[in-house]
Amino acid sequence: MFRTITTLAAATVAALLVAPTASAGESCPNDTICMWEDGGQTGTRYVQVELRPGDGARIYEIDGWDGDNEISSIINNTGCEFTLRAEDLGVEVTGAGLWRLGARSRYDDLNRVFNDAGVSANDDAESFILWC
Ligand SMILES: [Ca+2]
Ligand SMILES: [Ca+2]
């Protein structure tokens, strides 16, 4: 009887230890920048761009239907800094619509990421620039 209880207790502990990993968000491959619809790297992965060594500054359009004004979390697994833009490519954008973010960085909740104008980056990005 004691052995059965011990086994059940061990099984319960194992399940509790596994649960946070299972419910955590997705990862992003090396040398790649990924952006998700929801916080914590969950929901649809609207952006996954892999960089090759030697690539210079590059500008990317986030899809207007699947991604614009929906990005809420990011993993940047590249050695490049990047700037989120609140407008599509070719549309001028001021400082209130720009967020300069880091290389090798992770942003779990863009509601907590602000630019110098005090504007949150959540659900605002329409394009981005990688600075390598
Ligand atoms: Ca969102
Ligand atoms: Ca766009």
Image (cartoon, rainbow, N blue to C red):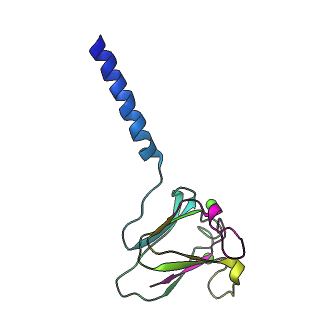
Overall secondary structure of the magenta stretch? loop
Residue 91, image x and y in percent?
68, 86
Residue 39, image x and y in percent?
57, 57
Q: From the viewer's perspective, is residue 26 above or below residue 32? A: above
Q: Residue at x 42, y 64 (%)?
A: 28
Q: Within the displayed image, which quadrant is ligand 1 positioned in?
A: bottom right
Q: Residue at x 38, y 31 (%)?
A: 13
Q: Residue furthest top?
A: 1
36 part of magenta stretch: no
Q: From the viewer's perspective, is residue 8 above or below residue 82? A: above
Q: Residue furthest left?
A: 3
Residue 18, image x and y in percent?
39, 40
- 47, 53: nearer the viewer: 53
Q: Which residues are magenta?
A: 107-132
Give the mark count: 0
Residue 84, image x and y in percent?
59, 76
- 104, 49: nearer the viewer: 104
Q: Residue furthest front?
A: 116
Please identify the quadrant where the N terminus is shown. top left
Please identify the quadrant where the C terminus is shown. bottom left
Q: Residue at x 35, y 22 (%)?
A: 8
Q: Is residue 115 left or right of residue 24?
A: right
Name the quadrant containing residue 31: bottom left
Q: From the viewer's perspective, is residue 91 above or below residue 104? A: below
Q: Residue at x 58, y 61 (%)?
A: 37
Q: Is residue 67 left or right of residue 31?
A: right
127 part of magenta stretch: yes
